[in-house]
Amino acid sequence: MPSLEADFDVVSALQRVSADTLGGMAGQSPPSTTSGRIRQRLHAARASFFANDNIAAYLKEGELEDLQEEVTEQVRGLLKALVIDVDNDHNTSETAERVAKMYLNEVFKGRYHPQPKVASFPNVKELDEIYTVGPITVRSACSHHLVPILGHCWIGIQPGERVIGLSKFSRIADWVFSRPHIQEEAVIILADEIETLCKPQGLGIVLKAQHYCMKWRGVKEPQTSMVNSVVRGSFRKSASMKKEFFDLIRQQDSLL
Ligand SMILES: [Zn+2]
């Protein structure tokens, strides 16, 4: 007789998740899972927890480790539902642990870990010439399929109130991109974070990336990339500033 164990695992997991969600919303018994308790806090704060949101502020000490155990069990359930013999296959016996660790601490770390510390300094010399930094490596994943989005971005600044070190742009970009995204929203989130950090007079970001949901599956277009940009402040108001920004990053692009 075939084992129905995998089915029961998935069903009981789903029941647990829905009970946590309902219990959390109705203020009933406390959720039995770590994710349930975190969701309850997010609901109570009316905080968004979309795939590209950071929820670090809603995790308590030690909960990331607990969440990793919970995700491990759920990934194991997924593998069983895919009819992979995780109990006997030496290649996949610890895949669930690896995938959970990878999601929470590597590829989606920008959801669960707080923003890296970035010191900003007053712009005492009142610098106002445009500078650009790039290419910055972009490693992300698409929200629709959870497969990689890989590419580069370029950031241009006309300094305003505060300045930050060049390497900090890479750190912030890595933190923002390490979440499931759609490219259109990713650049906006990155622009918002940079504006908050250094309040520039002008800001521009260009993102060029390849989407593995188009290369590996679906239409299977290996060369297609997506390019999008956001321009704010002086780069948006002044055609010459905007042109200078795009001219500068074109030179960096040619160095690739
Ligand atoms: Zn996709």
Image: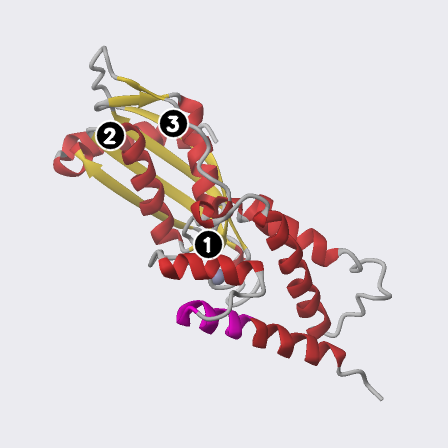
The image quarter in which residue 194 lies: top left
Q: Nearer the viewer, residue 143 or 130?
A: 143
Left/right of residue 131 with respect to residue 128 in the rendered view: right
For image coordinates 73% across by 71% down, the residue present is: 80
Q: Which residue is mark 2?
A: 199
Looking at the rendered image, the quarter that the N terminus falls into is bottom right
* Residue 214 seen in render: no
Identify whether 228 is placed above or below 143.
above
Q: Position of residue 28 (x, y in %)?
A: 46, 71
Q: Is mark 3 within 8 Å of ligand 1?
A: no
Circle 1 SS class: loop
Q: Which residue is mark 3?
A: 133
Observer-side mark, 1 or 3, equals 3
User: Which region is colored magenta?
Assistant: 17-27
Q: Is mark 2 within 8 Å of ligand 1?
A: no
Going by the picture, which residue comes out furthest to the front? Answer: 29
Q: Tell me whether circle 1 and circle 2 mark residues in contact (CB < 8 Å).
A: no
Circle 3 SS class: strand
The mark nearer the N terminus, 3 or 2, is 3
Going by the picture, which residue comes out furthest to the top? Answer: 125
Going by the picture, which residue comes out furthest to the bottom? Answer: 1
Identify whether 82 is placed above or below 47.
below
For image coordinates 38% across by 34% down, the residue present is: 154
